[in-house]
Image (cartoon, grey):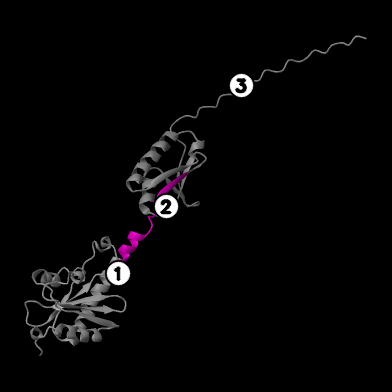
Amino acid sequence: MHDPHTDTGYLGSFAIILAGELPGTWRSQYHPDRGGNTDHDDLTVDVWDMNEVVDAMADYIVDHCAVLTRSDGTRLFVMDRKGHDEGFLIAAMAPQGIPLEAFRGVREPDGIAVADNPFTAAKDITHGLLPRYDNALAQVRHNAARLTAPAAEPDRVVMTWSGDDLVVEAPERPDIAKTLTDHGFTFDTHRDVLVLSGDDSARQGACVRAAGARLSELGVGVILRNLPARPALGTTAVAPPAPASTPAAPQSTPTTRRR
């Protein structure tokens, strides 16, 4: 077998053959040693690994390497397996143009060590590395979509006056429904609503305040619809002042016309 240590182009040749054996359309680009004074930081910074490959990069200078790029932009990093007579280390490279926050909590699709046989290496990558990469990439893209999505409207409970009762449309969230029923609301199956009776206005007000406090803890706001038209909960309505009486206009006394 060819000795990789006697020919700096061996890694490049390996990468070219490997690209032709992987599923899909791949191209290979070899990055040679440019005089021993470079570690290819512009490439190694994107290596998506927290295992054997990143350990090797921490212990040895990456003086040459290759990058395989699939037609959809997927990239694989290929480097010598430093400290071993044969073989290479291959790792996925993180996708570009995605906020770093999107990678939080996503496990890296750790790279693999392969023999210096591009045909068996292609099988190891196809059945091991690439599925892990696809899974991690899907999670990252999902996170990125959430980061860029417009902020959702906060959940709110609208309590609407119906006579003396307060009515709430049956909420979809079970925790909201439980909070309301725990604080005096009862379910009206005919109207598919929750109702808080107004038979006792003081109790009704206490229930609303307690339910509102608990809903606030759940991140849910409360709106009382048509409230300005009603007296405050737990208080007695003050009768509006009677309109001032208008004194009757004095009646004129008819005069007798002299003949």
Question: Secondary structure beneath disc 3?
Answer: loop
The residues colored magenta run 141-159
Q: Nearer the viewer, residue 179 or 152?
A: 152
Mark 1 and mark 3 lie on one chain; the one further toward the N terminus is 1
The mark found on residue 48 in the picture is none
User: Quadrant of residue 50 in the image?
Assistant: bottom left
Question: Secondary structure beneath disc 1?
Answer: helix
Position in image of residue 202 (x %, y %):
42, 33
In this image, 180 relative to 244: left or right?
left
Residue at image mark 3: 244
Q: Quadrant of the N terminus?
A: bottom left
Write the residue at 43% across / 32% down: 234
Position in image of residue 54 (x %, y %):
14, 70
Q: Nearer the viewer, residue 67 or 175?
A: 67
Residue at image mark 1: 138
Residue at image mark 2: 171
Q: Residue furthest front?
A: 35
147 within the magenta span: yes
